Every structure is written in C-alpha cells, then in structure tokens.
C-alpha cells in the first residue's frame, strides 16, 4: 500500500470518529434537555439556593456611668435587582438615579452607572452590587427617597445589606481591656471573654447564588431573625481610666521602660475602676498589646514581704518594736548571698524599720528562724491566701501562679521566697491581697463586669464576691497597716509623702530572671491604698526594665501611684474633709451674692441698690468679690474643653453652663453649689459625668 492511500484511510477514520463523537454529544444534550430536564432543573435550584447565617448585632460595652466603650454601628452594602421595577418607573428614573449614585460613589461616573444597570436589566441579571463602598444609616435614609429606590425592595429592587462595624467612642482608651474578636471567634479582652453574652444568637435566611459568585437574599417568610446580643456594663470609670493611662504613659516615656501596667480597684467591692497595660512598640511609641496585670506571672519582689510579715505576726509574738540584726548588709545562705540595698547594711533595727527600709536580710532571717524546720507551715499560709492558684477573674487569659510545694524546695527557696523570689504570682493577686488589708481583712474577688442587660432589663447581675472573710487576726492587721503607712512616711516611698491624705503601700524592685539567671534589669512596682485612714481605692503600678540611674520601685513606680491618687482625690469630693465655716462666709451688709449670669445679677443688684462694678461691658458669667459694701465682678475662665467653675451658682445657672459643655450632671441638695466633683480647669472627657453638691 502506497503512502498516499495510507494517509487517506487515516483521515477517513479520524473523520468518522469525530462525527460519531459529535452525534453522541447531540444525543446526550437532547437527553439532558428533554428526558432528564426536570431532574437537572431541580438539582440546579438546590445548588443555587442555600440557607446562610445572618450575624446578630453585638451588644454594647458601657463604663460604670453609662458611657459607651464599644458599640456596633450599622453600615450597608447597596445592591440592586434591575429586573423588578416596571418599564415606566425604570425609564423615568434611571438617569436621575445614576447621577445620584455617581455623587455618592465618585469613583464611578453617572454614565457608567447607567450602562451597568441597563446592561444588567437587558441580560436578565437579578442581582448586582452597585459599589464596594459601604454607606451609613443616614446615607441609607436619603437613598430610600431616590428615583426607583423609593419604590422599595419589592417594587424598586433596591437591596440594603446590613454590615455591623465595631466602634469605640473613646478611641484607644482601655484598648486591650475592651479587646477584640476576629472572624474565627478568637480575640482578647471583654469582647472575647464575654462573647457568649455580647454575641447574641445568629439568624438564618435563604440566599440565591448569582452569576459571579455573589449571593442574593430571598425573602421567603421562613427566615429566622437574629437575636441581638446583651449589653454589658463594666465597673470602669472613664475619668479614672484616662488619669491612669496618662500617668503610666508619662512614666514609661520618661524611663524608656519596656512595658508597664496599672490597676485601680475599689476597696470595699473589688470593682476594677481603671486598668492599663502599655508596651514599647517597634517604632518607639507605646500601645496595648498584652494584659500584663491579669496574664503576667512574675517574681513580685519586696511586695511579697507583706505575706512573710503576716505569717510571722500570726505565728509568733513578734512586735513592731522588736529588733533584728541585719549586720553589714550581706549574709551567706549556702553558696548564695542575700544583700540589702544600703551599702554597709542597716545594722540592728526594729521590725518596723526593717519593713520600712525593705531589708531582705531581716525578713529572710525572721522567716528562716520561724519556718526553717517547718517549711510546710509557711507554704500552707501562702496557700490559705490563694496565692498558689488563679483568682478566677472574669476575663480570660489569667496567669497561673508558680508556687513550689516544699518537697521541691532547695536550701535557698525559703529565705529567697521570704522577700519575693523563688515564687511567681500575677500582679492581680498581689493587689487583691493589699486590698484585703485596706478592707479590714476581707478579701474581695476583683471583678470588671457588673451586669448584663437588654435595654433597661438586667439579665445577669455580677455582685461583689468575698474570697476570704478574714485574712488574719485584727492584731496582725493593725501591725500591717502601721508598717505600710510607715513605708510612705519614713521608708522607701517617703518621696510620695506629704499629701493632704495618707497613703499606705509597699515598694518592690525585683531583678529580672533571664535564661534561669537574675540579671541587673529590674521589675519595679508599688502597691498600696488611699486614703490610709479611710481606704477608698487600692492601686498597683508596674514598670518593667526602666533605663537610667533611677531603677527602683520608689523612684519609678511610686510617683505614678501618687500622681493617680492625687487626681482621684481631687475629683472625688466624698474623700475631702468639709471646709471650716470661716471659709464659706463672706462679710457684708447686703444679701449674699456668689456667682452666676452677669445680666441677671447686675439687674438684681441695681434694683436692690447694691453697688456693683464691672471692668468689662460684655460678659456673661461672673463671680462676686466683696469690698466693703460693694461688689466687684470677676471673670472666671470659661475656655472651651475645660470644666467651668460653678461653685456659688444656683442650680439653673450651673446646669446651663455644664450641660452646654457636653457634661452629664447629677446633683444633690438645695441652694447654691458648694462643691463639684470635677475640678475647675480640668479637661472634659466626652460624655463625662459631673456631680454637684448644693447647700
């Protein structure tokens, strides 16, 4: 067979195979179209329709006075079914609609919008997304009055798909504490810890899959509506939170520290009023990335000496006047040395002085003498205070303390543990202990969420909880209070003494443990309470790895405590002693005039024949200054963003002035304002609360 004939046969065979394949395709298409058509149509509908989850709106997070810390704001994606509107409505409104859309979404012109919508209508598309940009509720309301859209979903075809976004009115205030929650339901802070309450219950609705992979909602009256999440009310005070964060940030920047934390707690209840954790970021600024106060587990250093002294006072007849010889400032325990801060040592000192000066040698000696042969008893005392286990705080991520049982102790564990080494606790545990001393021995469980509610109805109430009714005897408690006050009056924290109120507390400076060895980098702290004679608040400040020549708790952490305490004292009028009567009475032979609206006061004085003088003609708010039988008007500052001075004003004037500054006002009593909770001239926090007392 020649080559030409062979090629011809191959071509004919190939052609025959192609023809047979084409016939098979046509037959199969006919079978699918006419014989199995109903089956495939039903399957297409099943694949094209799907019940999908509708996310519930998250609940709000509030501060203790109702200020919003986090809320969900509704935004909307604008979609459109161009096939729904009838021809007359569509033709009449498409040009105006396209123009309005282009003004709202400038990245697309009116001509492009018209082309997109018209092409979709001609091709029979039932769902198109008009823009990737989302609109807010006010924009949505305006759009609902636009041509075609005003006919509504069922006759105009507009589809507003709701998308909730989390918003924080106070921006980064309490950032880590408020926290976050990602798409995988993992996060931090309150958002994560209380997700079961905030998250609500998701709904379900039928959606149809459209060309391009988008899903269009189909309203078949069988959708399950989502149930909104509960609101949670925290114990946080936004004013105290701002004070705490500002003071901490200033100290971290001054000392170029690695990180720091501060917590302010209400003594009688254990309610957390402020909590801040700041970390040095790569760019040198500070931000909240981790909750050191709750999750951090570290050697507490000298703040732990309170535990040692408490145990000693309970188990011995030791008094504050008893003495202890600390020698020349260094003693050997096996091959290791215990040193005091002062070169040359303190020599022979009283127990009171040993605590005030934070002598490691004194506390180690006392603990070794008492518990050297019975270490288990010292451990049992630590255990009885709950320092070997988590508190059970409301927020997730609480650290696990590390307190070795006596069977795992080495020869140096007991003396080192006496002054805060060889044991690791969370700062929250140490603050809880000191708070118990301030609270007459009653240990309260710290808490940060007080209730969960829907609208004004309380669904869950989280009440103050007692962890231990009495941490020690009254006699021991009295000794501890005297020692803690002495630390500030004469001891390591005497640099924060001299306030109008008394502070009690303890400094702490612990060397950091790096790769199993203690290095000359410090973890500084101060923990205490105020006013010491009638404690209202306890507070703990931590500063990690401060730089420079000042690296001790007294130099770094204690001043932060004082700054916070000073500002809280200034704001809380209940902590102030009342003024003596001589400071409240002004001499004069005419009716008392204090402060108020100048046109009114000037009119009254003129009518009553009272001599009054003003250096300015156009003034609004004035304060009276009495000279003999005449009034000279003074003009207190009324600068924008600052709290005005309303003392001496009648209620109506005070309310007008304060509420026009954006403050929420509560008042008590009758007459003139004699005190205000926010000091004049302090900066106003958005939505802040001020309390005024009248008398």
Image (spheres, grey):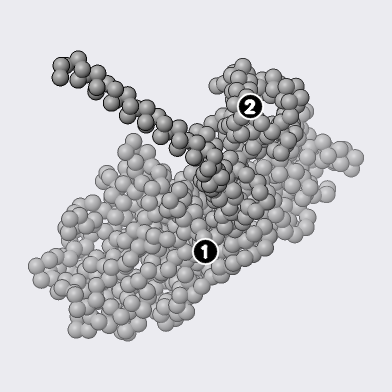
Asked if the residue at tag 1 contacts the one at tag 2, i.e. Cβ–Cβ closer than 8 Å, the answer is: no
Q: Position of residue 529 (x, y in %)?
A: 46, 63
Specify the label residue 121 is tagged with. 2
- Element type where label 1 sits in the image: loop
Specify the label residue 295 is tagged with. none
- Residue in front for this viewpoint, 426 or 312: 426
- Residue in front for this viewpoint, 573 or 191: 191
Q: Residue at image x 62%, y 44%?
A: 218
Q: Position of residue 345 (x, y in %)?
A: 20, 63
The relative height of residue 92 versus residue 154 in the rendered view (above or below) is above
Q: Earlier in the sequence, mark 2 or mark 1?
A: 2
Q: Quadrant of residue 514?
A: bottom left
Q: Residue at image x 59%, y 31%?
A: 125
Q: Residue at image x 59%, y 62%?
A: 452
Which residue is the extreme one toward the top? 4
Which residue is the extreme one toward the left? 335
Which residue is the extreme one toward the front? 1
**Quadrant that contains the C terminus:** bottom right
- Element type where label 2 sits in the image: helix
Q: Which residue is mark 1?
A: 271
């Amino acid at each position: 067979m020649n080559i030409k004939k062979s090629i011809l046969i191959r071509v004919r065979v190939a052609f025959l195979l192609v023809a047979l394949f084409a016939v098979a395709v046509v037959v199969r298409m006919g079978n699918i179209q006419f014989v199995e058509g109903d089956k495939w149509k039903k399957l297409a509908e099943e694949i094209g329709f799907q019940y999908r989850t509708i996310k519930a709106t998250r609940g709000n997070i509030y501060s203790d006075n109702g200020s919003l810390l986090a809320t969900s704001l509704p935004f909307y994606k604008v979609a459109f079914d161009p096939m729904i509107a009838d021809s007359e409505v569509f033709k009449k409104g498409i040009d105006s609609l396209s123009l309005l859309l282009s003004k709202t979404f400038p990245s697309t012109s009116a001509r492009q919008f018209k082309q997109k919508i018209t092409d979709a209508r001609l091709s029979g598309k039932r769902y198109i997304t008009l823009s990737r940009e989302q609109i807010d509720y006010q924009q949505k309301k305006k759009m609902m009055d636009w041509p075609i859209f005003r006919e509504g979903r069922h006759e105009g075809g507009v589809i507003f798909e709701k998308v909730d976004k989390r918003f924080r009115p106070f921006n980064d205030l309490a950032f880590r504490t408020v926290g976050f929650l990602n798409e995988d339901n993992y996060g931090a802070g309150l958002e994560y810890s209380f997700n079961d309450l905030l998250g609500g219950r998701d709904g379900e609705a039928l959606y149809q899959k459209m060309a391009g992979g988008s899903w269009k909602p189909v309203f078949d009256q069988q959708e399950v509506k989502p149930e909104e999440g509960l609101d949670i009310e925290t114990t946080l005070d936004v004013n105290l939170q701002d004070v705490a964060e500002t003071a901490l940030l200033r100290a971290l920047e001054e000392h170029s520290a690695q990180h720091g934390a501060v917590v302010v707690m209400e003594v009688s209840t254990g309610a957390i009023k402020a909590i801040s954790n700041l970390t040095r970021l790569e760019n040198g600024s500070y931000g909240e990335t981790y909750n050191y106060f709750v999750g951090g587990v570290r050697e507490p250093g000298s703040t732990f000496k309170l535990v040692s002294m408490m145990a000693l006072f309970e188990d011995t007849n030791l008094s504050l006047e008893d003495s202890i010889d600390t020698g020349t400032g260094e003693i050997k325990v096996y091959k290791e040395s215990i040193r005091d801060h002062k070169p040359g040592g303190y020599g022979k000192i009283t127990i009171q002085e040993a605590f005030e000066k934070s002598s490691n040698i004194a506390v180690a000696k006392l603990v070794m003498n008492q518990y050297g042969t019975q270490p288990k008893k010292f451990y049992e005392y630590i255990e009885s205070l709950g320092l070997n286990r988590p508190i059970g705080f409301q927020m997730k991520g609480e650290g696990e303390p590390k307190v070795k049982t006596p069977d795992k102790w080495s020869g140096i564990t007991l003396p080192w543990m006496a002054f805060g080494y060889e044991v690791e606790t969370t700062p929250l545990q140490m603050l809880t202990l000191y708070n118990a001393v301030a609270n007459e021995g009653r240990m309260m469980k710290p808490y940060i969420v007080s209730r969960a509610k829907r609208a004004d109805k309380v669904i869950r109430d989280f009440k103050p909880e007692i962890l231990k009714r009495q941490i020690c005897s009254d006699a021991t408690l009295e000794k501890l209070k005297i020692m803690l006050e002495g630390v500030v009056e004469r001891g390591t924290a005497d640099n924060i003494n001299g306030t109008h109120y008394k502070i009690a507390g303890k400094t702490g400076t612990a060397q950091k443990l790096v790769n199993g060895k203690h290095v000359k980098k410090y973890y500084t702290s101060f923990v205490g309470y105020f006013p010491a004679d009638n404690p209202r608040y306890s507070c703990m400040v931590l500063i990690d790895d401060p730089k420079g020549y000042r690296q001790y708790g007294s130099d770094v952490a204690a001043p932060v405590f004082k700054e916070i305490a000073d500002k809280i004292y200034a704001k809380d009028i209940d902590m102030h002693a009342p003024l003596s009567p001589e400071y409240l009475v002004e001499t004069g032979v005419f009716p008392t005039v204090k402060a108020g609206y100048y046109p009114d006061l000037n009119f009254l004085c003129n009518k009553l024949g009272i001599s009054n003088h003003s250096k300015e003609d156009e003034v609004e708010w004035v304060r009276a200054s009495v000279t003999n039988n005449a009034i000279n008007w003074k003009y207190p500052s009324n600068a924008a963003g600052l709290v005005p001075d309303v003392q001496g004003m009648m209620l109506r004037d005070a309310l007008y002035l304060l509420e026009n500054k954006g403050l929420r006002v509560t008042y008590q009593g009758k007459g003139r304002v004699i005190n205000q909770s926010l000091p004049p001239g302090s900066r106003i926090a958005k939505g802040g609360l001020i309390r005024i007392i009248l008398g």
